[in-house]
Amino acid sequence: MLPVERIIGEEGLSATPEGLRLAMRLPWYRSLPFSIVEIDSVHIDGAPVDLSDAKVEFDGSVWPLKELGEQTNAFWFVRDSAFLHIPDQGIAPGTEHEVALSMFISPPYIPGMKRANTQTQTLRVA
């Protein structure tokens, strides 16, 4: 898989006191503002995950997922992972799960482009 096709980060999936933390990578060849990134869906073991209370963490900042489109001054660097925090997922550390992540990006310098990226991977919960 090419780096611009990979959207699940090397840090994978980890349990937190609040739920789960999923590492994400930017599927593009250059840094982009978070405002043009749309997390479409997450499925765990084939079941859709409710993202209504999810948050995105990057470089010490945390935003509600629903406010990601407002982050015009926060840039996602291609070598860095961002983290999707998903609350209330009672998944135990050490277990393996099939995780599917789908996102769209719309680079501001390519009018009308909306690139879809999906990746499914079996991850062990850290």
Image (spheres, rainbow, N blue to C red):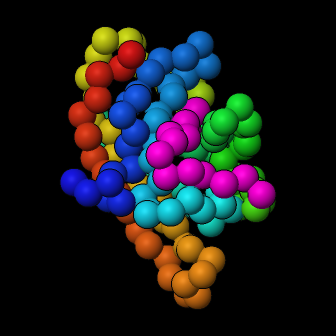
As drawn, 14 above or below 102: above
For this view, does 108 lie left or right of residue 13? Answer: right
Q: Image quadrant for the C terminus?
A: top left
The residue positioned 46% from the left and 36% from the top of the image is 23
Q: Quadrant of the N terminus?
A: bottom left
Q: Is residue 47 visible?
A: no
Which residue is more in the foreground, 77 or 12?
77
Please give the name of the residue rendered at 66% of the width and 36% of the height, measured from the top-left corner. Answer: 59
Most foreground residue, 30 or 41: 30
**Could you say where residue 70 lies in the image, as x and y percent from the top left?**
77, 59
Magenta stretch: includes residue 61: no
Q: Position of residue 109 (x, y in %)?
A: 60, 81
| Residue 13 can be seen, yes or no | yes
Which stretch did the figure color magenta? Answer: 73-85
Name the residue: 42% across, 58% down: 27
Residue 84 lies in magenta, yes or no? yes
At 64% across and 39% down in the image, what residue appears? 58
- Position of 20 with respect to 1 (left or right) is right
